[in-house]
Amino acid sequence: MPVSASSSRLIFDALKANGVRIMSALPETWLVHLIRMAEEDPETTLVRLAKEEEGVGISTGAHLAGVRSAMLMQNHGFLASVNGIVSCAQLYRIPLLMLVSARGEFGERDPWQTEGGLVTEHVLDALRIPTERLGSQGDVARKISKAMTLAYSASRPVALLLERDLMWEEA
Amino acid sequence: MKRIEAMRAVHDRLSQPRVAVVTIMGAVAAELQSIGHRPNFFYLQHAMGLASSLGLGLALARPELTVIVFDGDGSILMNLGGLTTLARYAPKNLVHVVFDNESLLSVGGFPTATSTGSDIAAMAAGAGVPRTSTVRDLASFTSAFDAALAARELTTLVAEVEAVGPAAFVTDLSLLENRYQFQRHLRSLAP
């Protein structure tokens, strides 16, 4: 499976360096290495979800309890989480770091992913969620750190879109 | 049994040190505030379904605290998958109470699926929650609640209550005031 293990390691290490101790996730192909790293790391609590919106509640509880967390999900999982983001994380001003795999963009071979790829950024914009794209390994540590900084200073959700060029090692 | 009577019967347990209480919106939040707000009470005033997930986040983040969630039938029915996540991690410090009045009281009393036979305790047990029960009167609720606190094992306790609530749902405790007070209180309890 050509999911980039080296990019996944950089992302995981950056999350840990920013104090993330709880990661919630729903399995998605691009996230398999990240989820495995979270599971194997004794300092990280991985919460495997049934549906992504639960992760908003878990991250809110963790934040109120003083623990940093992150959500790992596919863009369709983000779309499935919208009410939780609005009615929990935004209503209650929760710093919520969301790492969202950007499926359905150039290079996508799975027909079922393509519709979500067209709307993800528009929905993020409509929700006024500050978003940056992560497309190259050299940006990973810096952008994750800056995303976490803004999440905490603004006390709001922020998103990083994980691009195919970062997560998938294939021509 | 009325929900407010049930909460009143255990209010002193909710106010103990190292306890965190999370409620859903609407009648539960307004009634608990009318009995007596404490800085360790957090009322999730929207995001139906997520109170149990929020409780799981608290319980995992702070295993030294006891987390009590006051959920409702309408809310948990929106997050049944979350029962499987609760069961999967089964924090020993989480007591999940579901007040079942078979209706969406806050929006006019429309009947939920528990009015036609859906059994929340059975669904929680089926999800893998290790301790589940359903109670119908105040004495049974109080004893089951105390047993759940003592058990140190994830419990979903369904309390069948009358579909009656307060006259108004908006209180003078602002959402963000509650949120920051709760967070500061938990910080003050840091191990």
Image (cartoon, coloured by chain):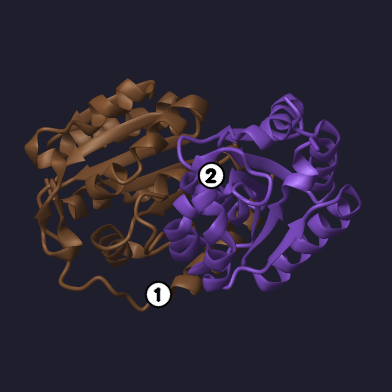
Chain colours: A purple, B brown
Chain letter for mark 1, please: B
Residue position for label 2: A113
Q: Which mark is residue A161?
A: none
Chain letter for mark 2, please: A
The residue at 41%/44% (across/down) is B52
Query: Quadrant of the rendered structure where residue A1 is?
Result: top right
The residue at 37%/38% (across/down) is B96
The residue at 59%/63% (across/down) is A121
Q: Amino acid at mark 2?
A: Gln
Report the side of B38 relative to B1 (left or right): right
Mark 2 Cα-neighbour bin, 10 Å: few <14, some 14–19, many ≥20: some
The residue at 66%/41% (across/down) is A22
Mark 1 Cα-neighbour bin, 10 Å: few <14, some 14–19, many ≥20: few
Q: Secondary structure at mark 1?
A: loop
Q: Are marks 2 and 1 in contact (CB under 8 Å)?
A: no
Position of the C terminus of chain B by quadrant: top right
Give the residue furthest to the right.
A138
Q: Secondary structure at mark 2?
A: helix
Q: Nearer the viewer, residue A102 or A86?
A: A102
Say above or below: B148 vs B4.
Answer: above
Any part of residue B136 in sight:
yes
